[in-house]
Each structure stands twice: as structure tokens, then as C-alpha cells.
Image (cartoon, rainbow, N blue to C red):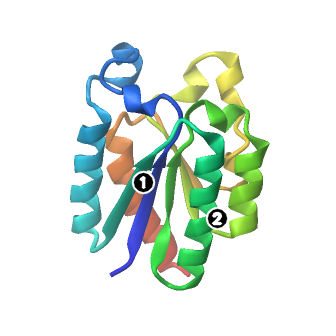
């Protein structure tokens, strides 16, 4: 059974209390439960992580590339938070690791502040999911399965 790696970046540990009008009232633990169910429904194991540190996210993406090359990992769902708009290092890590990755946003970033309209992740992502709330995680897991079945 392959694994799906769900990575969450800075401030996502504050889900449920940080701007609930934008991000909803569900906590990161609720999101993990949702991802557990979605992964199981798609015949996958889940590896779910969160970090406020860019370097740790980069290390995990490198690890994911090795795991995918070894046939153990289906791919990555990445909610990079604000790093989406600032981190060329994450872009380079994804590209260098050669991992199949879906960029995820809880809110519709294109309907928000102008600085959120640019993503350094999108050019190296297989797909982008935005604006479906936390349910986007389940949709992204199902989408990852569909995208990788085509290979």
C-alpha cells in the first residue's frame, strides 16, 4: 500500500482559531482526521505533517522524492501557507526531488490580497487546489490518485 504525504506549512497549526471567517473553524487535527478517511477510502496510508520552518518542509520534500522513486509514496499534497508566495527554495526542492505534488489552499487565494496571487509552487506542481475549504484536502487526495493512475 502506497502512502500519500500531506505537508502543511506555517501557521496551519492555528487552524480553528486563526481567521475562522477565511479558514473555517476546523482544527489541524480535524484536517488530519479528514485526510485519514480520504486516504483509507483511496487505498492509501497517510503521512501527515506540519511545520512552521521552511527548511524542515524542504527536507520532507527531499525525503518524499526518494520515497516516490522507491515506489513507496504516491505523491505529496502541500499547503505551503505563506511560503507559497515567497519560497523559491520550496520551488527548487520540489523540482529537484521530482516528486508528484498538488499545491493546496484552503481559501481562494486569487480572491484575496494581491500578494497571494503569485505562487512559486504552481510552476512545479502537477495540479492546484484552492477555495474548497478543508474539504479540498480530500479532493486533492482523490485527485492525486487520478493523476498518478494516468502514468
Characterize the local packing of mark 1: few (<14), some (14-19) or many (20 or more) Cα atoms within 10 angstroms. Answer: many
Q: Position of residue 90 (x, y in %)?
A: 70, 49
Relative vertical location of residue 97 with respect to residue 122 in this rendering, above or below: below
> Is mark 2 in CB contact (under 8 Å) with mark 1?
no
As drawn, which residue projects farthest toward the bottom?
Answer: 70
Secondary structure of the residue carrying numbered label 2: helix
Disc number placed over residue 140 in the picture, else none: 1
Q: Is residue 126 in sight in this rendering?
A: no
- Asked which quadrant contains residue 140, the reply is bottom left
Residue that label 2 marks: 62
Looking at the rendered image, the quarter that the C terminus falls into is bottom right
The residue at 42%/50% (across/down) is 49
Q: Is residue 109 in sight in this rendering?
A: yes
Q: Position of residue 149 (x, y in %)?
A: 46, 78
Mark 2 or mark 1: name the one nearer the start of the chain: 2
Q: Position of residue 26 (x, y in %)?
A: 26, 30
The residue at 56%/58% (across/down) is 60
- Asked which quadrant contains residue 44, the reply is bottom left
Disc number placed over residue 80 in the picture, else none: none
- Asked which quadrant contains residue 113, the reply is top right
Secondary structure of the residue carrying numbered label 1: helix
Q: Along the horizontal axis of the image, is 52 left or right of 38? A: right
Looking at the rendered image, the quarter that the N terminus falls into is bottom left
Q: Position of residue 110 (x, y in %)?
A: 60, 27
Select label 2 or label 1 by which is in front: 2
Q: Along the horizontal axis of the image, is 85 left or right of 143? A: right
The residue at 56%/28% (across/down) is 109
Relative vertical location of residue 117 with respect to residue 100 in this rendering, above or below: above
Amino acid at each position: 500500500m502506497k502512502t500519500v504525504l500531506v505537508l502543511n506549512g506555517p501557521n496551519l497549526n492555528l487552524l480553528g482559531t486563526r481567521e475562522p471567517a477565511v479558514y473555517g473553524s476546523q482544527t489541524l487535527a480535524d484536517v488530519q482526521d479528514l485526510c485519514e478517511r480520504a486516504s483509507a477510502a483511496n487505498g492509501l496510508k497517510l503521512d501527515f505533517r506540519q511545520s512552521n520552518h521552511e527548511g524542515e518542509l524542504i527536507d520532507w520534500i527531499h525525503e518524499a522524492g526518494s520515497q516516490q522513486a522507491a515506489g513507496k509514496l504516491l505523491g505529496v499534497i502541500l499547503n505551503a501557507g505563506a511560503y507559497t508566495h515567497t519560497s523559491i527554495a520550496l520551488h527548487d526542492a520540489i523540482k529537484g526531488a521530482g516528486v508528484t505534488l498538488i499545491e493546496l489552499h484552503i481559501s481562494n487565494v486569487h480572491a484575496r490580497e494581491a500578494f497571494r496571487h503569485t505562487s512559486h509552487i504552481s510552476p512545479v506542481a502537477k495540479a492546484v487546489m484552492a477555495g474548497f475549504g478543508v474539504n479540498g484536502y480530500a479532493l486533492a487526495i482523490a485527485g492525486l490518485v487520478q493523476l498518478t493512475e494516468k502514468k
